[in-house]
Image (cartoon, rainbow, N blue to C red):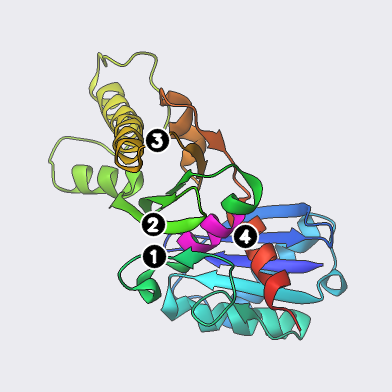
Amino acid sequence: MLLAVDIGNTNIVFGCVDEEDEVLLFERISTDHNATAAEYAVLIKTILEMNSFNISDIDDAIMSSVVPSVTNTVKEAVKKLFGVEVMMAGPGVKTGLNILIDNPAQLGSDQAVDAVAAINQYPVPLIIIDMGTATTLSVVDSKKNYRGGVILTGMKVSADALTARTAQLPKINFEVPPHVIGTNTVDCLKSGILYSNASALDGIIDRMEEELGEKCTVVATGGLSELVVPLCRRKIILDSNLLIKGLAIIYKKNRK
């Protein structure tokens, strides 16, 4: 069984994928810049045991990361636990994706992995949304070329900045308020943050399709997408396993 790991700025996602490309495990933990390899190893082992898996079930691993300071620590943790060398998704690894941006090396590994999974599962052209610390929208054209995209401030970052720079606005939980028009400060904040993100996605999708000159399949992933996407007016497919699926595909293209 393959262990697939994606290290993001806020969360690390773990997935287990069998030979038939079925995702058997999907878990998310907080990214801790101060954790040691041993501490990450304990977390990974605990996650497996909680889901009735054993260390012996894992025979290989692949990882993508946008946090260089954590990458080697988690790689070491995986090697300690399973005795395998971790394949890294990044420059020099075959993806089957034709990247047409100005400098392909600048493309985040998570965006590339998302795109690889999407073109293997959904009709092109595609717009792929990933809602994490930052929100990204990536465009794949009808010839499966990665054309570029948009990066905007993530929902949690926006909310934290707002409450940090104001004297009387409280921190809030991300919950859909009963009405768009809030009648108290907390509901006004919830409505403003959630609906502004939903409206931004709708608007950017419209403009991207206008620029491409054709309608796109829109797929969303990432920790906050399940909350925001239902508020959008555009049809958007939710796929929380997109990154894990993409890593499994890249692993199969590159394994010896």
Where's residue 221, x and y in %?
52, 46
Question: What residue is shown with label 3?
Answer: 173
The residue stretch that appears in magenta = 111-117
Q: In the image, what residue type sits under mark 3?
A: Asn
Question: What residue is shown with label 4?
Answer: 246
Circle 4 sits in a helix, a strand or a loop, which is it?
A: helix
Q: Is residue 121 magenta?
A: no
Q: Earlier in the sequence, mark 4 or mark 3?
A: 3
Query: Which is closer to the viewer, label 2 or label 3?
Result: 2
Left or right of 177, for residue 152: left
Circle 2 sits in a helix, a strand or a loop, which is it?
A: strand
Residue 63, picture quadrant: bottom right
Left or right of 92, for residue 255: right
Circle 3 sits in a helix, a strand or a loop, which is it?
A: loop
Mark 2–mark 1 CB contact (< 8 Å): yes
Relative height, residue 116 to residue 43 (above, below): above
How many numbered discs? 4
Q: Earlier in the sequence, mark 2 or mark 1?
A: 1
Where's residue 167, x and y in %?
12, 40
Q: In the image, what residue type sits under mark 4?
A: Gly
Q: Categorize mark 3 by other alpha carbons within 10 Å: few (<14), some (14-19), many (20+).
A: few
